[in-house]
Amino acid sequence: MSNWDVVIGLEIHAQLQTQTKIFAPDGASYTEDVNKNISEISLGYPGALPVINEKAIEHSIKIGLALNCDIRSNSVFARKHYFYPDLPKGYQISQFDLPLCEGGHLEFSLNGEIKKVGIERAHMEEDAGKSTHRGGYSLIDYNRAGVPLLEIVSKPDMTSGAEAAEYARTVRSILRYLDVCDGNLEEGSMRCDCNVSLKPAGQKELGTKVEIKNINSFRFIEKAIDYEIQRQAAMLEAGEVIHQETRLYDSTKNKTFGMRSKEEAMDYRYFPDPDLLPIHVSEDLIEKIRKDLPELPIDRAKRFTSEYGLPEYDALVLTADKALSEFYEKTAVNCKNPKAASNWIMGDFLKRFNDSGLELENIKIKPESLGELIVLIDRGELSGKMAKSVFDQMWDSGDKPENIVKEKGLSQISDPDEVEKIVDKVIHNSPGQVEQYKSGKDKLFGFFVGQVMKESKGQANPDMVTKILKEKLES
Amino acid sequence: MIDKKTLEKSATLSRLHLNEEEQGLLLEQMKRIIGHFDNLQKVNTEGVEPLYKAVEMENVWRKDQIFEMTDPEKLLSKSPEVQEGQVKVPQVVK
Amino acid sequence: MIESISGFQKKIDQGATYVNECEAAFKRIEEKDKDLNSFISLNKEQALESAQISDERIKNGESKRPLEGVLFSVKDMFCVSGTKTTAGSRMLKDFIPDYDATVISRLKNAGAVILGKNNQDEFAMGSTNETSFFGPCKNPWNNKFVAGGSSGGSACSVAARLSTCSFGTDTGGSVRQPAHFCGTVGLKPTYGRISRSGVVAFASSLDQTGFFSLKVEDVFKTAEVLSGKDLMDNTTSSKEVPKWSNNLELQDLKGFKVGVVKEFMSTDLDKDVKNALDDSIEALKKRGAEIIEVSLPLIEHGVAAYYLVATSEAASNLSRYDGVRYGHRSEKAKEGQVSLDEFYTLNRTEGFGREVKRRILLGNFALSSGYIEAYYKKACQIRRLIREDYFKAFERVDAIIAPVASSTAFKLHEFDGKPLKKFLNDYYTVTVNLAGLPGLSVPVTKNKDNLPIGIQLIANQFQESNLLKAGLNLEDEFKFYKEVPNV
């Protein structure tokens, strides 16, 4: 792979959470019933005119600011023409050469390194309806036609599938922090297209890019891109030419494949939509929105490092997801041990969470409970090892730690007299090993520790065991 | 200027079919018309911003509140073919 | 026969009923319109219901609404709920919207009666009403000639005294020219005065609803009721609508400056039209106006710039007509053996007439990659320069006087197969739309073929009051409304 530079750019479409569609007063949220959220405007009836939704503009500005973009003071809607049954007017209202947002950037951590990816632009547009394909015919539902979208186009700054996936995760995180889009790749409220091209190492001119459309998970983004890179590299090595095309990703085969080839590149005939005025955004409005922005992931990460003394990497992991960061913070505040809270969440918690495939709002364990667990450990009432088992039970049942500890009698034995009793018992029962230890076999110390733990059913406070054992064996 | 190939391209973009005769006639007419349009090239427009809206106007943004315009069922009933509450068209994907 | 809104209201005051007047109008339409073909469809049930309500209001002593019971007809570009709205096209020949255009609901709220939908060129594309799927509309003064277009039916029905006032749309002259051909008053207000919501779109940045009547005061009374910001149309202006109906008295033109366009004077006008124009200028001078020569140096490029912008926007606006959600769907397509592209192509090829197809092809050409800079964008640059020329002229004059067309009404079929020649006839009207200006056509005389001649007044944006002032004077001078065609 060292012969080739990999160039990756991502186009992300975010469905904005507004009450109504971008150009029509029909409802914009998902509904079971087909063709219910429709009007003459969203269906492109004769004489119907688009009317811009102020919330869609506000949400878009929010996203632009969070992506460090410049917000254009006069941006223009343009018509993008093509024929497709889910596109009622025969054109999509989008933005072309004067988009709302331009020139931003995004930072995120990948394998301990901080990456920075440029944002080319973000522009507003309307969504199309949904087609269902059957044998010989297709059915169209227009509920989604006209839902507001913000298309976020990155600069081609990424160089690996992993980086692209992490970029996409970061964008999603920001969208959720802003509460403007729920960023669900599977359901399609966030859609991701990837552009991949290769060029000879060091060459300035970019190679031909291939688009991979509509990848519906972050893992697949990484895999699809990795596959595509290999595919293109193999072709180039063999002297073949890469043609500009659109491909889809098959997750079962882990391959990208070409769509039925289109005759020619579409001529969209963009021109400014004469039914709409330019969006004039005042400095005042931008400042107002900027002021009201919630704490963004990167700022929260900085705050976690300064307020809770967490290392940068940990802070980035904990703030990647808004709900997770809130879970962490509640836990940390509750147990007053931010470092321990961080260790628990980044360790046992995330392991079980990732395996579960659940959403954070659906897990049983509560941050307050995790906090209490940490308090028990800090007080010495529960050994670290025991705590792991308690945690697992908390995860499964949602029960509070004290209840589990009490029920299962798992309290750590930290009373020195009690520990001493057990140590004495073990020493008494292992004279041979004591003899060997005293004559120089230091390694046998572990044997005694093991015996004490066995005798105490794992509940003896390990530090105390070590201390008392040492005292007794050295005397 | 326009030639047969360009006319065909335009017809495809327009989703219009022209038979041989129509094509021939139309091409002649459009050549003349576009020939007239070409006179615009005589005018020096360097530095002139294109004008897309003749009258200056203030934009008014719509409040994000749902209201029903026309009954969705009535709208849907205009479609020549409806199945399962959805608009039916020939297959999109071959 | 009702010749003006005030005349009508007087008749009602003297004891006539709205229902009787409405019924009489339908009777007259049935008799006279067979030959003229100024209506595509009639709205009998709704109209009589509306007239009935008006009569009851009078009986109950309720106040009269601004256009109570007035007999209107509207071009078939206006969506009227429950009535066929065809835009003169096969594509929409059976289309019945369940919504009213904003201007139609405002018209209804003002108490007016809508007699029916007027004939027009298909999708408002044309200048003779000959491209209509429903047959041409003839000139009521001489049926060997056309009524004009694209709002031919609207002009004709007012001239023939079938309706008192009518609605048209004016994109490049489609109200002013048929008004001139048919000897009625035709007003096109400033772009943005009147909502386009619910009006079938031809060219969005040029289209404007306009009005026909026999007397100048009536187009202004109507315009006043219908103008004003509409939240459902982002391209309407928030500028306050002047109370034109408070300024309907004739005033002299002392201090009023009228511009005569240098470039128009050197064009080939028919002798009759030239004489009418000269007489009109004299009349205004006589009444106190100062006549000043102005120049619109780029006016010769108006037709090209207009047709590039108009066809581009039209090609785009007509993309929605595909037979999917409404409108014409080909029988061949219904059989279900066609591909999607064939489906679209069949529906559109069958649904649209020749002129519409030609303009869609031109428009998509002008917008297409490789051509858009030299054609569409270039036209928009010229548009800015033309508007500048007008703004400069209006720094020196209050209104411009000009011909509407170089001749009187064309013979039927005169321009068959000659589309460019036909376009060039729009020379005097199209730049008014490019610059978003208001324009008024006032009938002044007839020629020996009995064909009317109207004269055009043009004012700066939002200065319709100047058109009213000068228009009332022209009308008072020539009193053309006294002429009645023999239908």
Image (spheres, helix red, strand yellow):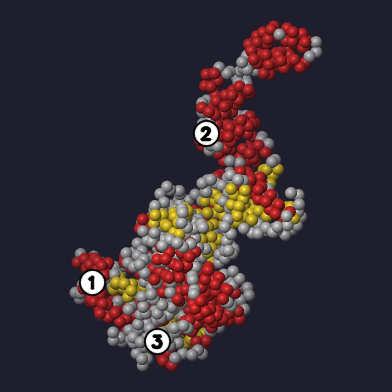
Q: Identify the secondary structure beneath mark 1.
A: helix
Q: Identify the secondary structure beneath mark 2.
A: loop
Rendered location of residue C163, percent (x, y): 30, 76
Q: Identify the secondary structure beneath mark 3.
A: loop
Instruction: Give the residue drawn at x 25%, y 80%.
Output: C31
- Snapshot quadrant of residue A370: top right
In-front residue for pair A165/B90? B90
| Residue kind at label 3, given as amino acid type | Lys
| Above or below for C341 versus C298 | above
**Circles 1 and 3 in contact, beta carbons < 8 Å:** no
- Residue under pointer 1: C18
Query: Residue under mark 2: which chain is it in?
Result: A
What is the crowding at mark 2: few (fewer than 14 residues within 10 Å), some, or many (at least 20)?
some
Rendered location of residue C295, percent (x, y): 53, 84
Q: Earlier in the sequence, mark 1 or mark 3?
A: 1
Q: Which mark is residue A363?
A: 2
Instruction: Give the residue drawn at x 56%, y 52%.
Output: A13
| Residue kind at label 1, given as amino acid type | Tyr
Q: Which mark is residue C411?
A: 3
What is the crowding at mark 1: few (fewer than 14 residues within 10 Å), some, or many (at least 20)?
many
Instruction: Give the residue drawn at x 29%, y 72%.
Output: C42
Labels 1 and 3 in the same subunit: yes
Residue farthest toward the right in the current orientation of the protein: A440
| Residue kind at label 2, given as amino acid type | Ile
